[in-house]
Amino acid sequence: MRDVIVPLLVDEALPPGGSTLFTASGRSMGTGWSARMMLPPGADGAALGRALQAELDEIVAQMSHWDSDSLLSRYNKAPAGSWHALPPQFYEVAAYALGMADDTGGAYDPAAGELVRLWGFGPTARYDQAGFQAPDAARIDALLARRSERQPQLDHIHCRLLQPGGASLDFSSSAKGYAVDRMAACLEARSVRHFVVEAGGELRGAGVKDNGEPWWVEIEAVPGATGNQVVVALHGLAVATSGDYRQYFQHGERRAAHTLDPRSGRPVANDVASVTVLASTCMAADALSTALTVMGPQEGIVFADARGIAARFLVRGASGLNETVSAAWRNLLQ
């Protein structure tokens, strides 16, 4: 079977006459990116590709936790009491992510970088390297106690961030989505209004193809699973999926996946295999898919329905995957 999702609001404007389909692609953030666009007459596709790469390079320079010289890495190593002026991109992500932490009651926390490293999902001492050992309860509890006293403080008036000492930011569940949004903004600023952009499986689309068809995309499936195929008309929408099948190791009888519950200090243990979110921005879809994974289907659906979030949970059960969707997701089904 196939589920088809179509946005509630559709702009029927077609690309300018004489537009041609153009594809640009490259590498960034340890993954590939691509952009398919209806190129207006006279537009320089190669120049657009370079502009998109430059946008992504700037995101990496500011927010990569793999690059030791990035702004994020320098903030994480900075002395206690130091204030850090933020460029617009970093400020936008930090403001959104810290606000999401408050809204989710800590189920989402961009200041959990030390916890990520403790469980082997950071850039060093990784779970898939020799010598790694999962942390015991004492190490986890000690880290949580320290982290509660080391929360970053964002000065919205002066666009700066306080390092209280030992705070460790990790934007891996928001920066990629934000990068996709910046790609969309880059094209729109250059009068390209009909496109689909993607980085690492997260996508955002606008407009239509020259024949009036939307940009159809298939929702990422859990490997080896059977069930409904979901396709989305990516028209004024972004999509991101968080799954337990990307980075994980076996920890006792459970799968220790890279999505951690910042409240408990441990990998989520609610049997959620994946959460897909549709939103107007990819940063929101990216962050929300992570937050809802941590919450699980019961708490997560309540949270999503209260805020009109279109979300789909796939939960592992004895007989396979069980699907649970929010009201906003159901409203988009055709």
Image (tube, grey):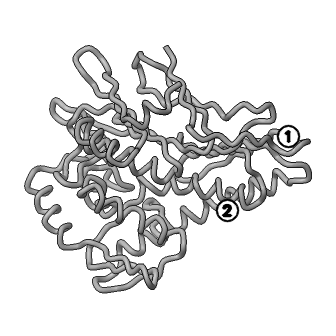
Position of residue 22 in the picture relative to residue 129 (left or right): right
Which amino acid, mark 1?
Thr
The image shows residue 227, relative to residue 202, as above or below, that is: above
Q: Name the front one of labels 2 and 1.
A: 1
Position of residue 206 in the picture relative to residue 137 (left or right): right
Position of residue 207 in the picture relative to residue 251 (left or right): right
The image shows residue 268, relative to residue 6, as above or below, that is: below
Question: Is residue 56 in view?
Answer: yes
Give whichever of discs 2 and 1 has the lower sequence position.
Answer: 1
Residue ID at (53%, 68%): 89
Residue ID at (79%, 40%): 14
Depth check: give the residue in front, 83 or 310: 310
So how many labels did they put on this image? Answer: 2
Q: How far across and down, in percent of the image, does residue 34 sit?
A: 66, 44
Which residue in the structure is indicated by mark 2?
Answer: 54
Q: How far across and down, in percent of the image, does residue 210 sit?
A: 81, 35
The image shows residue 189, relative to residue 308, as above or below, that is: below
What's the mark number on residue 20? 1
Q: How far across and down, in percent of the image, does residue 185 sit?
A: 65, 58
Which amino acid, mark 2?
Ala
Which residue occupies the extreme left position in the image? 138
Residue ID at (85%, 45%): 16
Q: CA distance from mark 2 to mark 1?
A: 23 Å
Q: Tell me the element at label 1.
A: strand
The image shows residue 112, relative to residue 6, as above or below, that is: below
Residue ID at (29%, 33%): 272
